[in-house]
Amino acid sequence: MDQPDQSASEAPPPTLGIGMVGYAFMGAAHSQGWRTAGRVFDLPLRPALAAVCGRDATAVRAAADKHGWAAAETDWRDLIARDDVQLVDICTPGDSHAEIAIAALEAGKHVLCEKPLANSVAEAEAMVEAAERARANGQLAMVGFNYRRVPAIAYGRRMVAAGRLGALRHVRVTYLQDWLVDPAFPLTWRLKREYAGSGALGDLGAHAVDLAQYLAGEPLAGVSALTETFVRERPLLAGVSSGLSGAGSAESGPVTVDDAALFTGRLASGALASFEATRMASGRKNALRVELNGELGSLAFDLERLNELSFHDHTEPAVTSGFRRILVTEPEHPYLEAWWPPGHALGYEHTFVHQARDLLEAIATGTDPEPSFADGLQVQRVLAAVEESAQKNAVYTPVQA
Ligand SMILES: NC(=O)c1ccc[n+]([C@@H]2O[C@H](COP(=O)([O-])OP(=O)(O)OC[C@H]3O[C@@H](n4cnc5c(N)ncnc54)[C@H](O)[C@@H]3O)[C@@H](O)[C@H]2O)c1
């Protein structure tokens, strides 16, 4: 007798319509995440790339075709109003995060918002209030600190939480890029306070702060900071910018954000932290490095070698101990159960696939996703304390609890 075909009788998972605002750098990365998540992981919800929004009708239609979105909109309000959109994914500069996220939550949509959550603490607070109101109706909100979804980082967090490092003494994060070294690089939105909120601080420092607090499992209590804008005038942008590129015109204008931010901090437990965020480190492209030193051991991570975690077990005899390389590609490592055999490495784009998976699972199970808008607000408060300290020439400044 023929056995019934199990796979044919299983109902496919329900779909969740995604609407994405912004289609350049992060828009492309998030599209990749939404497109791929359900093809790699067995998801309880299948993402449908319903519509993408941009302001130029021709360009957004081309982006929709390139990245696999069914429809194109030119006003984010129309995107939010669509019946086939249940989740709004915000990939625009920070100046529009609060307005879009609050409107989407109020319209009964789930929200994924790129980092930093907002351009100010006040905006971030309003977003958290909107998220709390929406939560009562079952809508969820998450902020896109995607580096938490690097398997080595997620595994490092597990090791810290399991006590492998013991009491933490130091957290050290440097996030170095070099795309602003050339003074002829144009004045894109990332160099204007009204669009970006801050410079290297909000762009790179926000990731650094989130990672430090996530890995340590505790918040920063206060900071002491220096910031600098080395190139104060730049050519105006000619045409459209995308991600970290753009062309300059003959006219110039003022840079109104920091080029670099250096700060030290104290974690709630008393551990000391140091941070460096700059877009002026010639030769460094996307060098995010983290090290934690504890009583029982140390962990180190380098985004340019993102499948690896360095671990030193300080309880081992000194004659044979030392940093060893953990290749984070085993099926037991976070996210790896669905990918390739051990040693077949992952990359940057996979963090966005993992981000999509985690959010879809949270929505399907009704659990609160992390990092939450409240986590994004807390990072915003650290950034505000850094700016306040820098204005006072590095005076130690508590982070608002
Ligand atoms: N998670 C990460 O690692 C990471 C990396 C880069 C950028 N980001 C964040 O992602 C966001 C976007 O950065 P990006 O690098 O993708 O910028 P980008 O300049 O490459 O793209 C911005 C997009 O937003 C669109 N846009 C701007 N205002 C709009 C509006 N009112 N309505 C519709 N579309 C609008 C632009 O047309 C463009 O498509 C920022 O918040 C940034 O900090 C995060």
Image: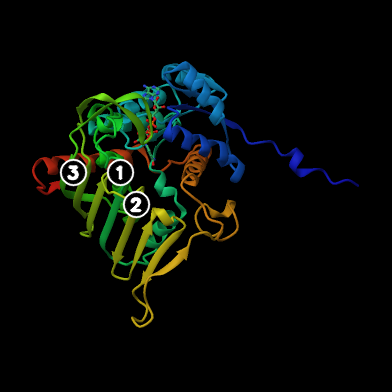
Q: Which residue is mark 1?
A: 204
Tell whether 225 sits left or right of 63.
left
- Which x, y percent locates residue 88? 45, 28
On-image quarter of the C terminus: top left
Q: Residues within 10 Å of mark 1 (few under 14, many from 20)?
A: many
Q: Is residue 150 above or below residue 33?
A: below
Looking at the rendered structure, the secondary structure element under dot 1 is: helix
Is the residue at mark 3 in contact range of ligand 1, meaning its CB lies under 8 Å from it?
A: no
- Which x, y percent locates residue 221? 20, 50
Q: Is residue 130 above or below residue 217?
A: above
- Which x, y percent locates residue 364? 53, 38
Ligand 1 quadrant in view: top left
Nearest-to-viewer mark from 2 and 3: 2
Q: Is 234 or 220 nearer to us in this picture?
A: 234
Badge number at residue 386: 3
**Structural distance between the alpha carbons of marks 3 and 1:** 13 Å
What type is the residue that disc 3 sits on? Val
* Disc 2 and disc 1 in contact, CB within 8 angstroms: yes
Q: Residues within 10 Å of mark 3 (few under 14, many from 20)?
A: many
**Structural distance between the alpha carbons of marks 2 and 1:** 9 Å
Query: Which residue, as the protein is rendered here, is positioned at the far right?
Result: 1
Nearest-to-viewer mark from 3 and 1: 1
Badge number at residue 288: 2
* Disc 3 and disc 1 in contact, CB within 8 angstroms: no
What type is the residue that disc 2 sits on? Leu
